[in-house]
Image (cartoon, helix red, strand yellow):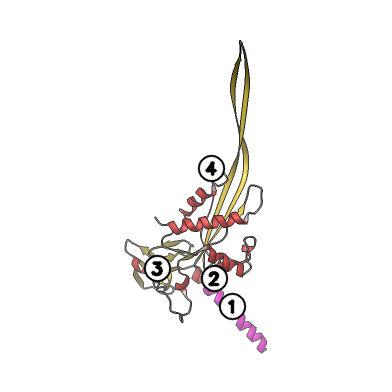
Amino acid sequence: MNRFFLVAVAVALLLFAANVAAQEKSFDKVVKTDGEEMIGKVLEIDAESIKFVYQGESLTYTVKQSEINKIQFASGRVQFFTEVTEEKPSQDSSPGLQDHHNLVAVLPFDYMNSGGNRDDKMGLKVQSDCYTYLRKKAKLFDIQDPATTNALLVKNNIEVNNLIGLTPQEMANLLGVEYVVYGAVTINQTSVSSYSANSYSSKANGSRFTSSNLGSSTSTANFNTNVDLKIYNDQGQSVYSDTHDSFWPSENAYEITLNYLIKRTPLYSK
């Protein structure tokens, strides 16, 4: 009888926890510049402040935008306001939100070359390029150096081909960041363009002339390059997902396409 009672209590607690988690996902989360999180509903956003109601309450609060780092809406959309100024933690302080707040890690890209094979060296190259682009264009964020990211992956026996073994939330926690960037580049050869040119030469030999036809041809391979980019936060929620085919037919066209996608992420700022 006691055993049955304990099982029933455990099930009830699990159901309660699941219900609370589900309720939290249906509300907006306001993250302030000091790390405080406000769970509830954003009613209005004007030029200098927002109007907010806490979960389970009816009183409306006004919060200055200068005090807000970001709003994570129930829909999954994230809106950023100000940059967080973090103080360096003392040696005896315990890790918390500020340790990884606005920190972004870029994973090695899954790079499939025109031969249909995974190219890990190029995957690291694209990871480095993405890191460089983000450092220039994601000014409100700190981008984790790929050397740190890759060292943590190696220490945990994680490679490009088994990244799916961890959820985005688990990956963010492992790397100690708030956002994780996943990417893939797929290249397919579509056609080969051939060009030919003819030239003529003549030579006089007394009163006789001889001529010859000299022909030359070149071939250029054309490629279709697809870049896929995804960003998740440390709660496992998708904040950006898009894929784009390059307009250019060259094999290194991923660079322009990657830059194009980064400009459309919520991390980008002018």
Q: Name the mark nearer the viewer: 1 or 4.
A: 4
Residue 248's disc number: 4
- At a point 54% along the width and 57% down the height, the residue shown is 127
Residue 202, given in percent of the width and then of the height, sits at: 59, 18
The part of the image, by quadrant, that contains residue 41 is bottom left
CA–CA distance in space, label 1 to label 2: 23 Å
- At a point 59% along the width and 21% down the height, the residue shown is 201
Q: Amino acid at mark 4?
A: Trp
Q: Please provide the residue range marked out in magenta.
A: 1-21
Which residue lies under the disc numbered 3?
A: 84
Q: Quadrant of the C terminus?
A: bottom left
- At a point 47% along the width and 70% down the height, the residue shown is 100
Which residue lies under the disc numbered 2?
A: 173
Q: Amino acid at mark 3?
A: Val
Q: Nearer the viewer, residue 196 or 180?
A: 196
Picture layout, residue 169 above or below residue 13: above
**Marks 2 & 3, CB-CB < 8 Å contact:** no
**Marks 3 & 4, CB-CB < 8 Å contact:** no
Nearer-N-terminus badge (1/4): 1
Which residue lies under the disc numbered 1?
A: 14
Q: Residues within 10 Å of mark 3 (few under 14, many from 20)?
A: some
CA–CA distance in space, label 1 to label 4: 53 Å
Q: Nearer the viewer, residue 191 or 10?
A: 191
Q: Amino acid at mark 1?
A: Leu
Residue 108's disc number: none
Mark 3 residue element: loop
Nearer-N-terminus badge (3/4): 3
